[in-house]
Amino acid sequence: MNADILMARKEYEAAAKVYQTILIDDPRNVKILNTVGIAFQQMGDVATAARYYKLALRYDKNDFSAPNNLGTIESGQHRYGKAIKYYKQSISKGNAVATVYANLGYAYCSNKEYVKGMEAFGQALKLDPTVFDPKNGAGTIVQERSSPDPAGLHYALAKSYAKVGDAERAARYLKQARDEGYKLYRNAEKDPDFAKVIKDRRVQEVLHVQPAYAAEPAPPKPATN
């Protein structure tokens, strides 16, 4: 079976075995090295994944996928400073895709550097307005999806989409930030970054419709004698 199909089905161990047989005859195939690394990373074996990524970078100094993928490993270990360096290395190759800028933004936001994070998100959205939408399939590049501060991250994403006038996604991420406990989400009403979308019905509903969790009754107080 085609290894890319196995990856799409999340059958990572089987996919890795197929990719490794290809590498026997073509050990310097940078695309395959990155992809087999992703398979091991998805299985949780980040040490083996990093070894394949570093081999890819050794064989092709201009490969932007490998430093990006190494950055996601560092980010997964909460070493955001190292992750940022890897993402910048990827971008310095000159042909980085939107995913790399998105990952850089995630790392900055996870490191509480939200202004820099939004700048990176802005670059990502210029290259691909759908970069943060869920996607499936095989490829040579890993996209970061986690953060220790999801509420702050989603507010930053809402601002980024608002700045480019995408009210639908701005409202979606603003609602996520609100529902995850971001207490300052109503600041959007006076934030100039939201100016293009603030009057949109979907954004107004997020700002003024009471969240479901806020409407839950408080637990009864214990009885006293």
Image: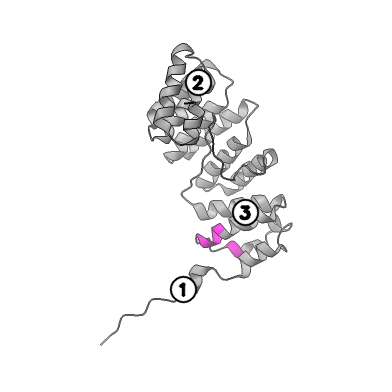
The front one of 30 and 72 is: 30
Is 183 colored magenta in this rendering? yes
- Which quadrant of the view contains residue 76? top left
Residue labelled with disc 1:
216
Q: CA distance from mark 2 to mark 1?
A: 53 Å
* Mark 1 vs 3, N-terminal side: 3
Q: Position of residue 127 (x, y in %)?
A: 68, 38
Frontmost residue, 111 versus 62: 62
Q: Secondary structure at mark 2?
A: helix
Badge 3 element: helix
Residue type, label 1 = Glu
Q: Which residues are magenta?
A: 176-186
Label 3–label 2 contact, CB within 8 A: no
- Within 10 Å of disc 2 (Cα), the crowding (few <14, some 14-19, many 20+) is many
Q: How packed is label 3: few (under 14 Cα within 10 Å), some, or many (20 or more)?
A: many
Tell me which label, 2 or 1, sits earlier in the chain.
2
Q: Is residue 187 above or below residue 6?
A: below
Q: Nearer the viewer, mark 1 or mark 3?
A: 1
Residue 66: in sight, yes or no?
yes
In this rendering, is residue 17 above or below 119?
Answer: above
The CA span between labels 1 and 3 is 26 Å
Q: Toward the viewer: 208 or 40? A: 40
Disc number for residue 158 = 3
Determine the secondary structure under disc 1. loop
Q: Are discs 1 and 3 less than 8 Å apart at CB?
A: no
Quadrant into which the C terminus falls: bottom left
Which residue is outermost to the front? 1
Residue 177: image x %, image y %?
Answer: 55, 58
User: Label 3 to label 2, Cα distance in Å?
Assistant: 35 Å
Query: Which is more toward the observer, 150 or 166?
Result: 166
In the image, which disc is placed on residue 56? 2
Could you tell me the amino acid type at mark 3? Ala
